[in-house]
Image (tube, rainbow, N blue to C red):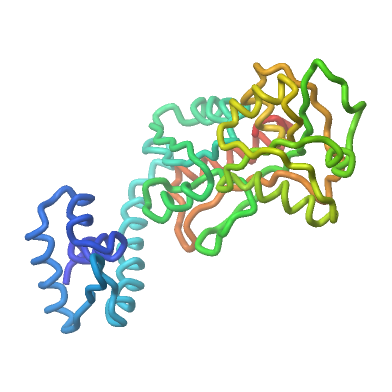
Amino acid sequence: MDIRQLRYFLMIADEKQVSAAAKKLYMSQPPLSQQLKNLEASVGEKLFERSGKYLEMTEAGKVLYKYALQITQLLEEAKNEVQDVSAGVDGQLSIGINTFSLANLNTVFHEYKRKYPKITYKIQQNESSLLCYLLKQREIEMALVRLPLEIDDFTLQHVHSEPFYVISSKDKKIFSGEVTLKEVSQYPLVLPSIKGLGVYYSIHEAFSKAKIQPNIIAEFSDLKLMMQLVSTDFGISIVPESLLYLYKEYPVRVNKIIDKEQLSGEIGLIWLKDHRLSKAAQNFKDTLIGCLEKGQNDLL
């Protein structure tokens, strides 16, 4: 048994097909099948059973999977720690960014680049649930996500809470000043419906906790279309502060929702549990937190 075989085994277990694993590993299927046979011979147990088109791990396979993850992770972390001798001034920052987390986040990146000019970047933008998948696949090292989210496999550091606003057409003055969810519920409501962003769940949970039935007439995964329709008086909407920065070109009237104990947007940094962050990632985390502590509350 060697580390290469363990990595092959992990890929087959994750993909559930030798052919799919071979494609991910940029190798042909026969040599990968042979490596699996060699590994099974080495441990003296069958590691997979066929279930239709897919392979499922045997009990022996599940035990090996747990240790193979630990071994490959320890090896990767040992390599990273040796490479981190330069205190993170070299290397790559591999990070995921939630779709709604970009308002003025460039300020943080500019500050980080000023401190660590030799760092290169691999940045993935996606919804939070997909960023979790990329973390598990080790395609990124940490991610800036919206909560709530299933984070049992991750370490979480909360970094920011943002308010929600009701938006409406500038042509009609529906509200004056701050508003409550009860007031909002009296009007036709269109909502962002990208469930993986956490926004969808937060809004529905707020109405549920307040025991208010909203007058929802539409849900949109296309946020630009939603903003366009709101600006032309199709209905009103509830959005987090960061969305206002992303779509500020649309002419809408903005009123803050004051049910803070029931509706707020939580943003956090997550990374794999029991994983030692590279120095480049630690330095980015410190830079982000430092910027927020300086009072730059409009970063996210």
In the rendered image, residue 195, in percent from the top left (x then y), is placed at 58, 47
Q: On the picture, is 107 further left or further right than 260?
A: left
Towards the viewer: 288 or 95: 95
In the rendered image, residue 161, in percent from the top left (x then y), is placed at 72, 43
Q: Is residue 62 above or below residue 195?
A: below
Q: Is residue 64 above or below residue 233?
A: below
Residue drawn at the location 35% of the way across and 51% of the way down: 80
If the image is split into quadrants, where does the N terminus sit?
bottom left
Residue drawn at the location 55% of the way across and 47% of the way down: 196
- The extreme front residue here reads 217
Residue drawn at the location 23% of the way across and 62% of the way down: 17
In the rendered image, residue 230, in percent from the top left (x then y), is placed at 71, 25
If the image is split into quadrants, where does the C terminus sit?
top right
Towards the viewer: 56 or 103: 56
Residue drawn at the location 83% of the way across and 35% of the way down: 187
Q: On the picture, is 5 further left or further right than 107?
A: left
